[in-house]
Each structure stands twice: as C-alpha cells, then as structure tokens.
Amino acid sequence: MLDIKLIREAPDFVRQRLATRGGGDEALVDELLALDERRRKLLAEVESLKAQRNRVSKEIGRLLAEQKTAEAEARKQETRALGDRIAELDRAVAEVDSARDALLLRMPNLPHASVPMGRSSADNPVVRTFGDRPTFGFAPRTHVELCERLGLVDFARAAKVSGSGFALYTGRGARLERALIQFMLELHTREHGYTEVWPPLMVGPACLEGVGQFPKFKDQYYGVAEGDDPAQLGKLYLIPTAETVVANLHREEILRESDLPLRYCAYTPCFRGEAGAAGVGTRGLIRMHQFDKVELIQIVAPERGYEAHEEMVRHAERVLQALGLHYRVVLLCTGDLGFASAKTYDLEVWAPGQGAYLEVSSVSNCEDFQARRMRLRYKDAQGQNRHPHVLNGSGTALARLFVALVETYQQADGSVRIPAALQPFFQEEQIVP
RNA sequence: GGAGAGGUGGCUGAGUGGUUGAAAGCGCACGCCUGGAGAGCGUGAGUACCCCAAAAGGGUAUCGGGGGUUCGAAUCCCCCCCUCUCCGCCA
C-alpha cells in the first residue's frame, strides 16, 4: 500500500501519479485524508484519557498498598466514567481505522517516473527485440495440431477429468514440460544466483493481500475448503503464481541489511480462475486454469531496486535466448500497469503457429508497496527500519513457452527439433511422429 | 480426528491482578581497558502509532490473535490460531 505519510505530505503528487493509471483512484485521496485527520483527532483525545486513567490506576494501587481503602474507593468511583468514554472513543477509532485501511488497500501503486503514459496495452512501447521471426517453407501448424499429432498433450481427456482450461501432458510432452522446468531452474540457480525454493501451493488470504491481489481481485482465485464445510472456505487459496507465497516468505520480519538482496527462484503450478477472461474456452495451451511457471523473486534495498529490476529482465530473457526463440521486451504504460507494480516489463515470445506474440514473463518492481502491506522491513546501516523493494518476474511461464517452442521448431514432416540447450534435459534431439 | 503440554523482548527464561515495557542469563552495539583480540568494567538498545515545525521531549498500544471482567490484565474468563508429545488415520 501507499505510505500514508506521503499522501499526507504530498497529496497533489499522489493524485497526479494515480491519475496516470486512468482508473480514477485519485478521487480516493480526499476521502482518505479526511479519515486520516479524523483518526488522529480521535487518537489524541483517547490517548490523553488513557494516560489519565493509567495515572489514577497507579495511584489506586499505591493507596491500596498503604491500606487507604476509602480513598482508593473514591478514586475508583471517579475513574469509572472515564472508562466508558474511552471505550466509546476506542470504538470510533477502530471504525475509522478500518475504513482508512480498506481505502489504502484498494489504492494501487504509483507508477515510476520512467513509465510511459498510456491508456492500454496498445500504448506499450517495445524496448528491444531478440532474433527474427522464423520463416517456414510450409504453412506452420499450430501447437494444438502438433501436440495432437505427436501425442504431446491430450486435451480431450484433460477436459473429461477437469473441464476446459486444463492440459494433460503425455509421454514426450510431459517430458518436454519437465525438461523446460529443469532447464530454467538450473539456469537461474547456477548462473543467476537465485536460491531454489519449493513452496506450499495454498496460502492464507493475508498473503494474497500482501502482494496486492486482495481485496481487489478476489474473484480470480480458487478458494479451497477442507471437506464439505463451507465455513472452511476463505482460509486457503490455490496460488495464482509463486509470487503470492515466495514474496511473502519474510512477511512481518525485520531483516538485516546484510541479508539483502534475497533472491528466490521457484517452480510451481499456478491456478487461475480467469473469471470473465476472453478465450478461456479456446483450444490449446494459451490460457489455462492450471499452468507451470518458474518464478523469480528479489527483495532488495530501495537504492538497488531498479538496478535489480533491469537485471531480472535479463535473467528472464536468457531463457528465451538460450532456447533460440524470437521475442520482444515491452514496457507497460501507466494504463496497463498491474495494481501493485511501479514498473513492469513484459516478455513476449513469438509463436509462429499463432502468428502472435505471447506473454511469457512479466517482471515488476513493486517498490515498497508490497513490503508495506506485508510489514516486511530491514534495518539499514543507520539502524532505521525501512521497507525494501520487492520484485517479481516470471522466468518464465511454461505453457506458452511450450507453445512457442513447439511452433518455432516444427519441421515440414510434423516433427519438432529440440534446441541444444534443452537436449541435456530432454535427452533427445527431436520429437518425431 | 482423540488426549495432553505450551506460546513472554534477537534467544533462553522468571513472572498468577497494582511504579512490570517486563527479573536474570546469553547474544548485540558503543565506550574504557589492550600492541591487537579476549576477558573484565561501563553505557545503550524492541515495534507501531499520536502530539510537537524539527530536535529535545511527552503520550498510547504491544507478553500468539480477538473479545470480556476490572479503576487497573502478561497475570482471571471466553473464542480462535500456532507449536510440541502420544494415540488414531494416511501418501
């Protein structure tokens, strides 16, 4: 969430930055400031009353110790009314508090100054590209055709057991998926200095709130209930991305500066309701309720936030480079930026069978927005507690990468070559019908 | 799922209604001491919020979380969460 002190001290700046997102959130600033002012007013009053009560209580203790029971009783009588007033004010504070927090939790992060202005994905500038679109001496097939011919994915049986939006990888398809996961984990842990973690796949709502998914996007998630007890719902959710759990690993901690940077790499399945998303029902692997992803997380000192951000984009790019896939890097404009992010790059890989770029990675610096929500801090050299920058990036998402790979390396006879970097993990050079 | 034990500051651990924000020990930081280190001695130190232009200073809250009793709660009552042990079940 945003720093209430910043909103208090520079409301115009905050309004202006929020306005660039085009979501109308700047209108909340005045409401927030009014609540904040009321809160402080109430606090000042109730706290001075409590101070008074504490003084009298101590005095009563002293009087009782000195056997002056009558005097103590008199004091008690006096103070009784104070308690009622305090309780009343406490309730008022709690009300204002929760109203203020609810507002704060709904306000998105401020876009970084370097983020281009824009309304939608159409305004995202391409920052750089790698490679060229491959050419074919034949009409390239879609991954759906290729997968069915080669027996890599059984969509029909996946739908039979789980409905649409699920894939059953079979035989060499399953092995290819596993090889890609293994390849990426090895790359990031051995060459980019990330620590591998394999986290729980279900988390409590506090974690979703911590990364900024709650309360705004509550309908996107799969809630899990143990048994048939509806009261259990809302206790645990399937993670929509490893970010949800890994970014929260140190929540409510005060780290030492020497602990930073923390770099984690995690392979996990990801689960998404995709409620209302166009194309869930379309064939193929492009939009799924369940997909695999290798995620990168960094927790760094604010001074190093944007340096680390650029570095992370390069780490994700190396996956696509090593696999020899054509891709482009896009910088999200203000209007397309995610709720928690201050700056985001997307990696879009070319899928010849689709004739389109597919988003396989999104690398964001959320600055201290998430750290503040999850009460994650570190103690700097001066002994000050500060919120670190929390960054997340896909390194990369699997299903679409699978699509791009199969479509890019398809041959005229319907077979698929395996790029050299993947061969040690896949153990074969090609997939033939 | 059943039975029991327990959750106190960075850690260990005292504390069952009244100067207890919390003994003691360890660890930590700084200073003295030392050629240097250690030992020893001394000093300091939680977190969040509020008041104050700021600093200084003052205040409130915080002993797993929430609620209650009371003038006053780490201490009493209720609910919840978590950890550990044993049993059951189970990959």
Image (tube, grey):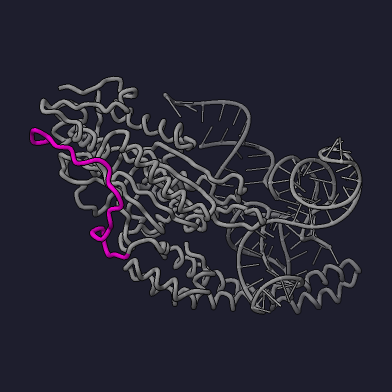
Q: Quadrant of residue A218?
A: bottom left
Q: Residue at x 41, y 30 (%)?
A: A186
Q: Is residue A161 visible?
A: no
Rendered location of residue A257, percent (x, y): 61, 49
B35, above or below A364, in the image: above
Q: Predominant secondary structure in magenta?
A: loop
Rendered location of residue A245, percent (x, y): 45, 45
Q: Is residue A175 visible?
A: yes
- Residue lying farthest top? A427
Q: Is residue A124 magenta?
A: yes
Q: Quadrant of the C terminus of chain A?
A: top left
Q: Quadrant of residue A164?
A: top left
Report the magenta residues as a range.
A117-141
A308, above or below A340, in the image: above
Of residue A299 and residue A48, the one placed in the foreground of this image is: A299
Rendered location of residue A392, percent (x, y): 42, 48
Of residue A129 and residue A319, the one placed in the foreground of this image is: A129
Q: Is residue B36 left or right of residue A285?
A: right
Q: Residue at x 83, y 72 (%)?
A: A59
Q: Is residue A392 left or right of residue A131?
A: right
Q: How many marks?
A: 0
Rendered location of residue A106, percent (x, y): 41, 64
Q: Residue at x 32, y 41 (%)?
A: A397
Of residue A76 and residue A286, the one placed in the foreground of this image is: A286
Q: Residue at x 47, y 61 (%)?
A: A1
